[in-house]
Image: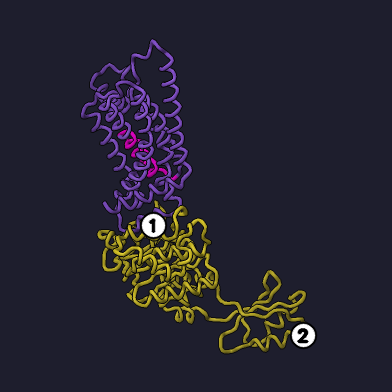
Amino acid sequence: MRNIWTIARREYRHYFSSPIAYIVALLTLLTIGVYFVVIIYYLTNQSYYSNTAPGVDIIIGPMATVFLFATPALTMRLLADEQRMGTLELLLTTPIREGELIVGKWLGAFLFMLTIIAVTLVFPIVLNKLTSPGIDQGVMISAYAAIILLTAVFLAIGTAMSSLFNNQFAAFFATLAMLVLFWWLIHLPTYIIQNTTINNVFNYLDLNTRFTNMLAGTMSLSDIVYPISLTALGLFVSSIAIETRRWR
Amino acid sequence: MIRATGLTKDYGSRRAIENLTFEAKQGEVVGFLGPNGAGKTTTMRILTGYMPPTYGSAQVAGFDIISESLEVRRRVGYLPETVPLYPDMTVFEYLKFMADLRHLPNAEDMVDETLEMVQMVKRADGYISNLSKGMRQRIGLAQALLHKPEVLILDEPTIGLDPAQVVEFRNIVRDVGKERTVLLSTHILSEAQQLCDRVLIINKGRIVAEDTPENLQARLVGAEHVVLRIKGEADDLLPIVAKIEGVQNAKLQPDGMVEFQFVPGTDVRPAVARATIKAGFDLLEFRPVGLSLEEIFLQLTQDTTRKER
């Protein structure tokens, strides 16, 4: 536990001296901000439409799309960079386990993303003031839980890709490809396959549907269990990748 | 204490080291001497627990490097060839991070103490990215010394240091080596001579010689080499030098120098100098050439192949 925290703390601090992290933060807040202002402006000027008050999904929805591109940029260097600088050799000759290293690295990135997410809490507070009788607190909590879980998954997949590739760009694009697969592509076969059992599998694996369920506040247990298991799998693959690196 | 038995490592089909067996006792500084690609780094990486050997086993500080890797890593200080530093951290932050990873009880005091040892106290709050190569090397060494390891493993530690820093560095290593085990690699013969109690010469993944530096030197230097340069062509000088008694293997070098050997004890140098002047040549340069490391390797590898037959 202590080693995980030591690694995570270094990683978290590193983001504050890294330009990529600031670009990710800027991109996220800018996108959500512009989106938010435009939607509010639009809705207040459309009298016939104003009987449906906007919910927290107008904030969390675009956030997920931004994160899809932003998180690979944060994770691409996690292990690829250690390899390049020779510090992986240092870390692997200190008395810490591969698993602790991986979880620590992931946790550092996760805490950084949580910081950005925490800043976006400004938007629901403003939205709550703007609308009457205010936004649904339950849906807001569920939506934020959804984006937090999604971030955890995205970062774990990114960590795994970074541990498999020595090259940062390869890690970036491999992560992006994996995220696009789990986010957009994986439910597409259900349109052509007739077999319900196979379709159930694809539907189960689809991150997007689960995210949408949580965003709407209608989540089931598997909507929570699935992203957590995917995160665990990503971190497990990373540890194995680092461990096998020793044996090559 | 380091005890390696039959260490072998294959990278795919290429054998990096083969059947290395050696020992380094407590209070001993052992040098790994060999050309690039001889397998020094591979051996060190195995001993530090970075990667396992393909065959063979080793004990470091009393623990097995494979089954008790964490225990080994707790007791080893390692400075890899490419000094592993985080440029975005300050010197103090970096060493504190390493101290935390090693669970040192009074981390900050240990960091201060080590910084003093490598004389970097003044730069403690400076960013590592702003340090010179020599300073980075010292921080790398500090990281390896931080937890007062029983075994210190240093891969090419003096590369990039200026002569004054090398002297300083040697003092630190000698100091540490008094009570602990130090294994260091180098391809500089004089460095091994000055620092090490014992030298292992490694070539193409095998140990070709193991002895004290003095013994190795004595064993290897069979004859002394001298070169001399004169003004103009040396073609006419060669037969004159070759005729002098005691001169062996006189030959013309491509750059116009005359090279010859003589057996130590029968110094023929005054006679050669006199003869050169007497024959009317202008003597410009006259100096001994030591055996280069390459020649030593050549000798040693020839020796071992002969023995094998």
Write down which chain is painted yellow: B
SS class, disc 2: loop
For chain A, what colour was chosen?
A: purple
Image position, residue B300 (x, y; %) = 47, 72
Q: Outermost residue, right direction?
A: B280
Q: Outermost residue, left direction?
A: A221
Report the span colored magenta.
A149-166
The residue positioned 40% from the left and 49% from the top of the image is: A13
Q: Is residue A156 magenta?
A: yes
Image position, residue A46 (x, y; %) = 42, 13
Cα distance in 3D space between marks 2 and 1: 64 Å
Q: The disc labelled 2 sits on which kind of residue?
A: Ala
Q: Quadrant of residue B184?
A: bottom left
Q: Determine if residue A66 is in view.
A: yes
The residue positioned 47% from the left and 54% from the top of the image is: B87
Q: Which residue is mark 2?
A: B279
Q: Quadrant of residue B2?
A: bottom left
Image quarter hosting the N terminus of chain B = bottom left
Q: Looking at the image, which is closer to me, B299 or B169?
A: B169
